[in-house]
Image (cartoon, grey):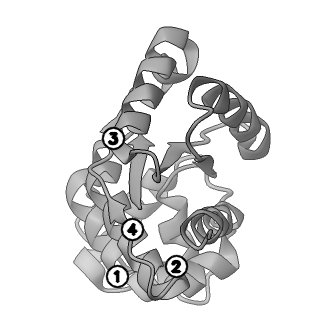
Amino acid sequence: MKVACIVEGDGEVVALPLLLRRLAEWRTPGHFPEVLTPIRVRRDRFLNREEEFRRHLLLAGAKCGNDGWILVLLDADDDCPATLGADVLRRARACVPHRPVSVVLANREYEAWFIAAAASLNGCRGFMCDPTDAIDPEAPRDAKGWIKAHMANGSYGETTDQPAFTARMDLQQAFDRSRSFRKLCNEWNRQVARP
């Protein structure tokens, strides 16, 4: 099975395939789909320009082939992940009814999953936080800013730190503390382990 992903950030282009390969080892041993290089979109244009939305979904459908799966991963930002996710999924299924499609919205940003697994990231690339801090990982509006504030050098780079944190984060911690990460895991199980 091939997995064609649509993402909005440069960091996710590198980090998401890494995360999905880790999910394969953790959630579905024995099932190792081919995760293709993600298609990067600009969120507003992708969501608000029907021709662009359709073009990217058709491209993803062509890339994953007849037995593949399309995964759309976006940041929810200030939108309700459940509401926007359902709308994007409905529109996507209308564009590519011949392919399985999943839509996951990280609440609020992909980096919220790092906050959920923050204890496992202590010391990684200069990241430091109090492991007893009970912050709701999906509460900070600016999850990237929260991560940056906890970096020893005060700098966070999506294209360098995001893949490194993705490789190191404790997936069980993220699963336990983040509803949107559980959604990704559930979609993975449903699509990859299907007969």
Examine the image and state in which quarter residue 103 appears.
top right
Q: Identify the residue under disc 3.
A: 63
Q: Identify the residue under disc 4.
A: 33
The N terminus - image quarter: bottom left
Looking at the image, is 4 positioned above or below residue 170? above
Q: Which residue: 42% across, 63% down?
A: 147
> Which badge, 1 or 4, is on the more N-terminal residue?
4
Residue at mark 1 to residue at mark 3: CA–CA distance: 29 Å
Residue at mark 3 to residue at mark 4: CA–CA distance: 13 Å
Residues at discs 3 and 4 in contact (Cβ within 8 Å): no
Q: Which residue: 33% across, 38% down?
A: 39
- Horizontally, residue 62 falls left or right of residue 107, namely left
Residue at mark 2 to residue at mark 1: CA–CA distance: 9 Å
Q: Which residue: 35% across, 51% down?
A: 12
Residues at discs 1 and 3 in contact (Cβ within 8 Å): no
Q: Which amino acid, mark 4?
A: Pro
**Of residues 126 and 169, the one drawn nearer to the viewer in this rendering:** 169
> Which badge, 1 or 3, is on the more N-terminal residue?
3
Q: Identify the residue under disc 1.
A: 168
> Which badge, 3 or 2, is on the more N-terminal residue?
3
Percent position (x, y) of residue 25?
42, 85
Q: Which amino acid, mark 1?
A: Arg
> Which badge, 3 or 4, is on the more N-terminal residue?
4
Residue at mark 1 to residue at mark 4: CA–CA distance: 21 Å
Q: Which mark's residue is nearer the viewer, 1 or 4? A: 4
Residues at discs 1 and 4 in contact (Cβ within 8 Å): no
Disc 3 element: helix
- Horizontally, residue 18 falls left or right of residue 184, namely left
Residues at discs 3 and 2 in contact (Cβ within 8 Å): no
Examine the image and state in which quarter residue 136 appears.
bottom right
